[in-house]
């Protein structure tokens, strides 16, 4: 119930509850202390009166004269009732208020000679009293001297104090609750403002930021965190917008070429050979479009972060399978594709299809950017608990100023450079996204004229020698060497 209230009300109620508890404890403590102080004062008065009587007793040597003197001096007193008795209860003195009934015997008889014993008693005819009893030794008898004082006045003082507490406590509490509510409302006003500002921030207004009156307090930190989140969203939105625009542009070009080709071919009647050439050229564009669409689909799947279906798999088998697929392509385009030594048998945790795609993409690039007769070497080694897969070529290489950009989407060092096949500028970004999602790293070393070496490192552990059985049918029956995408 309280949890559903607005924060300012919850704060106020908590504040009120704590304050009420503090006030109650304070009032109870003051009440207790006050009662003690008053009792102590009364006890001191009683002690003093006992001392006065004792002084008289000790001065007088003769009992009859002592009795007369006690009666004369202490028969009447405005604050105290007094009694002096012998051990056998014979009264030597009883003041006016207790003349008939006397003062009660103390619950515990004081020792001789000892301190006065104090206690609360009910004296008939007088009411609740504080009483002091003390035994005094005289030459003729042990005398019990008792003094008592009504506690009415003390109770009255305490009652007044309690009334003051009861009257002022609720007023203080209500005043403090009011102040607390106003303070909480004022303190939380920036939150309301921030909420209103955040409402204004939509996908098209991501350049806006939340204002924080005090950047160092909690709300300032919250505003900074939210602003950081909005900045990241702005970046992501920018990326998505750029990606969409680039993708549309990339798709438009081959479509325009296709359309132009078809229109030009249809302008007049042509020889069958000419139609054939036109169709072949159109087929090339269609292949490029197909590849572009596959790459875009792959990237959007990677971006959507569909939960990966990771399993323990033999990376050497994945590399061997991709290598086998690409050997046919290499032979077709007159490049030499070789394994640089035995592939190290190793197990990695990952997604077989996506890792295969990485290897295929890298070999595809190496074949694309080498001259006819060029050499492409694939290797897989275990280095501690890491598998290191490399694809190295002796091709054109990449100029250093382009190296930092080659993992950007649609980035191509030179759009006209692939010596065969098509270039989408998405191959390396896909490789990097896949490798990163496997917790690995991908690194490119290249220099113009000196070839390119791409190294992929993944966490791995050694496995037994390669298995003899055929690779799974699901990856063999696929028509495109790029896999499902
Ligand atoms: P694509 O190969 O489809 O153009 P990538 O993202 O795979 O796209 O590569 C981006 C760019 O990096 C390529 O356009 C090419 O210029 C350069 N590149 C990639 N691999 C190599 C390589 N092995 N040798 C030389 N240049 C390469």
Image (cartoon, helix red, strand yellow):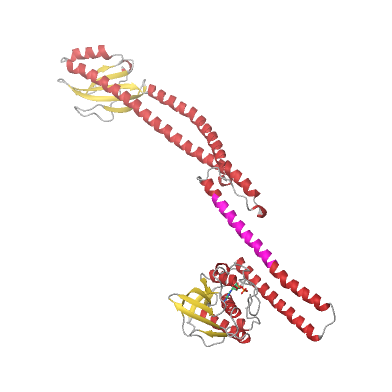
Give ligand 1's quarter of the image: bottom right
Residue placed most toward the observer, 339 or 464: 339
Instruction: Establish if 310 lies above or below 235.
Output: below
Instruction: Establish if 71 lies above or below 253.
Output: above
Residue 121 occupies quadrant = top left
Residue 419 occupies quadrant = bottom right
- The image shows residue 328 at horizontal and vertical percentages of 61, 86
Residue placed most toward the observer, 137 or 87: 137
Q: Main secondary structure of the magenta part?
A: helix
How many numbered marks does the figure carry?
Answer: 0
The answer to whether residue 87 is visible is no
Instruction: Establish if 479 lies above or below 163.
Output: below
Residue placed most toward the observer, 368 or 383: 368
The answer to whether residue 475 is visible is yes
Q: Residue at x 65, y 49 (%)?
A: 200
Residue range of the region highlighted in magenta in the rendering: 224-248
Q: Residue furthest front?
A: 449
Report the quarter where the C terminus lies.
Answer: bottom right
- The image shows residue 143 at horizontal and vertical percentages of 21, 22
Q: Residue furthest bottom?
A: 468
- The image shows residue 99 at horizontal and vertical percentages of 31, 17
Residue placed most toward the observer, 36 or 422: 422
Residue 484 occupies quadrant = bottom right
Q: Residue at x 35, y 29 (%)?
A: 36
- The image shows residue 138 at horizontal and vertical percentages of 16, 21
Q: Is residue 271 magenta?
A: no
Q: Residue at x 76, y 83 (%)?
A: 277
**Left or right: 335 in relation to 42:** right
Q: Is residue 234 magenta?
A: yes
């Amino acid at each position: 119930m309280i949890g559903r209230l607005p924060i300012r009300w919850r704060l106020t109620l908590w504040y009120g509850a704590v304050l009420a508890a503090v006030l109650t404890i304070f009032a109870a403590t003051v009440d207790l202390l006050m009662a003690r102080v008053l009792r102590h004062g009364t006890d001191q008065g009683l002690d003093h009166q006992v001392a006065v009587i004792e002084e008289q007793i000790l001065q007088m040597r003769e009992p009859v004269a002592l009795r007369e003197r006690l009666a004369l001096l202490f028969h009447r007193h405005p604050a105290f009732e007094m009694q002096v008795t012998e051990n056998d209860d014979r009264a030597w003195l009883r003041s006016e208020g207790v003349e008939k009934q006397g003062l009660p015997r103390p619950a515990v008889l004081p020792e001789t000679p000892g301190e006065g014993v104090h206690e609360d008693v009910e004296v008939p005819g007088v009411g609740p009293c504080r009483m002091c009893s003390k035994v005094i030794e005289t030459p003729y008898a042990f005398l019990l001297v008792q003094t008592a004082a009504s506690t009415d006045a003390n109770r009255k003082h305490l009652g007044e104090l309690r009334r003051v507490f009861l009257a002022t406590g609720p007023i203080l509490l209500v005043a403090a609750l009011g102040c607390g509510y106003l303070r909480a409302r004022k303190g939380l006003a920036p939150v309301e403002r921030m909420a209103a500002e955040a409402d204004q921030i939509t996908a098209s207004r991501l350049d806006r930021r939340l204002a924080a009156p005090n950047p160092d307090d909690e709300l300032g930190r919250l505003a900074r965190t939210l602003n950081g989140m909005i900045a990241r969203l702005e970046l992501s939105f920018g990326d998505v917008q750029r990606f969409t625009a680039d993708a549309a542009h990339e798709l438009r070009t081959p479509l325009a070429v296709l359309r132009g080709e078809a229109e030009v071919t249809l302008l007049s009647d042509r020889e069958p050979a000419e139609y054939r050439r036109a169709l072949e050229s159109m087929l090339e564009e269609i292949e490029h479009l197909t590849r572009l669409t596959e790459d875009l689909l792959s990237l959007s799947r990677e971006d959507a972060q569909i939960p990966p279906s990771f399993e323990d798999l033999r990376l050497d088998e994945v590399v061997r399978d991709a290598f086998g697929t690409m050997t046919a392509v290499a032979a077709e385009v007159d490049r030499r594709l070789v394994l640089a030594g035995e592939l190290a048998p190793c197990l990695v945790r990952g997604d077989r299809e996506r890792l295969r795609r990485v290897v295929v993409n890298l070999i595809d690039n190496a074949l694309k950017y080498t001259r006819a007769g060029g050499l492409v070497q694939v290797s897989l080694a275990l280095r501690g608990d890491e598998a290191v897969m490399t694809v190295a070529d002796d091709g054109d290489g990449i100029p250093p100023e382009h190296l930092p950009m080659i993992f950007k989407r649609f980035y191509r060092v030179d759009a006209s450079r692939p010596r065969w096949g098509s270039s989408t500028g998405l191959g390396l970004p896909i490789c990097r996204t896949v490798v990163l999602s496997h917790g690995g790293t991908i690194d490119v070393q290249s220099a113009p004229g000196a070839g390119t070496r791409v190294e992929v490192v993944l966490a791995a552990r050694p496995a037994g020698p390669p298995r003899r059985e055929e690779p799974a049918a699901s990856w063999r029956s696929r028509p495109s060497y790029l896999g499902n995408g």
